[in-house]
Amino acid sequence: MSTVEYIENMITGAPLNSHNTLITRRYFSKNARNGAIHGFEYAVYPVFSDHVIFNSRHYMQPDHAPNRMSRTVGGYGRLEASKEHTMANAKQAAAKKLNMAERAQQQMDVHFPNYPPALIWRRKTNDGFTTVPRTLPIAMQAIDMQSKGTPAGHTLFCLWARAPDHPFMTVENPATFAAEAGFFGERAVDTWRKRMKRLRELNFIATKPGASGEFHYVLLTNPNAAVEWMRTQGQVQDVIYSRFLDRLNDVGGGNDIKAYYAYWHQVHAANAANAAQPKEGEGNDPAAQTPVV
């Protein structure tokens, strides 16, 4: 490249992929008549990254004949200040990809620029947050489909919203939980308790009694495992279950289902082993022993 001069660096959107950037460089001979092109190069980069995911260089032969153009293709590389490329592996390139929050911020800057920060809730700066499964809205639909007349999905959501970022919680005042779930009047707590019983029947919670009553201690179970249990009992319609699986795979929660079946396999194996063992006292019962001939 010593006989050429870098004179143009054109950046456009890469074909068929709006997340990448296409950089085209054209090299011209310093002493060629009319600035004859000496060669050109294509490089594709992810947006906001300096890692090359595709690189194609085309150089003219010394006689500058168009039909004598040579071509070399590079793999992953990095653009330095000298405009030269050094090799980098695919993992380094992947590390430069934007995560979900960064992509969301990028789109927000486009569609809602300069939106007042005081009117936006952010988990890392605002107080009063918890962590909930992304599949929870679909789990709530499955619950409501199996508790018609007494829908308990919103009651489950209120429990998660009250949880201290931990599956265990204490219900000191059932009336407060009943009001947040939307129940009012003299029978508000009784109505709330009916919903809690239904959630327990569907394996979305486990409970123990305490000072405030039957639901003083509450353990929030994995809603993904609960939905799968409902499916095994024929209590989840195909349309809901299909939507549940799609969302579960989107968020990378497929291992929850594998863990669910692995657990029950262990339970069944343990039960079978216990059933095969003689009951206490059977081994010492003369009537149960085989006579020796």
Image (cartoon, rainbow, N blue to C red):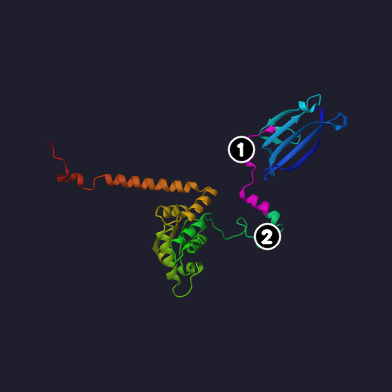
Task: Indicate whether 133 appears above or below 213.
Answer: above
- Picture coordinates of residue 15 (x, y %)? 69, 42
- Picture coordinates of residue 180 (x, y %)? 51, 67
Observer-nearest of 47 and 180: 47
- Picture coordinates of residue 234 (x, y %)? 41, 55
Name of the residue lying farthest toward the front: 67
Residue ID for mark 1: 91
Observer-nearest of 266 and 282: 266
Q: Say whether residue 27 is visible.
A: yes
Observer-nearest of 14 and 143: 14
Q: Say whether residue 1 is visible.
A: no
Q: Quick one: label 2, few (<14), some, or many (20+) residues within 10 Å?
A: few
> In the figure, is residue 292 to the left or right of 242?
left
Residue range in magenta is: 86-107
Numbered disc in front, either 1 or 2: 1
Q: Quick one: label 1, few (<14), some, or many (20+) residues within 10 Å?
A: few
User: Residue 117's mark?
Assistant: 2
- Provide the secondary structure element on which disc 2 rests: helix
* Residue at left offset 69%, top offset 40%: 45
Residue type beneath disc 1? Lys
Tell me the quarter of the image containing the N terminus.
top right
- Provide the secondary structure element on which disc 1 rests: helix
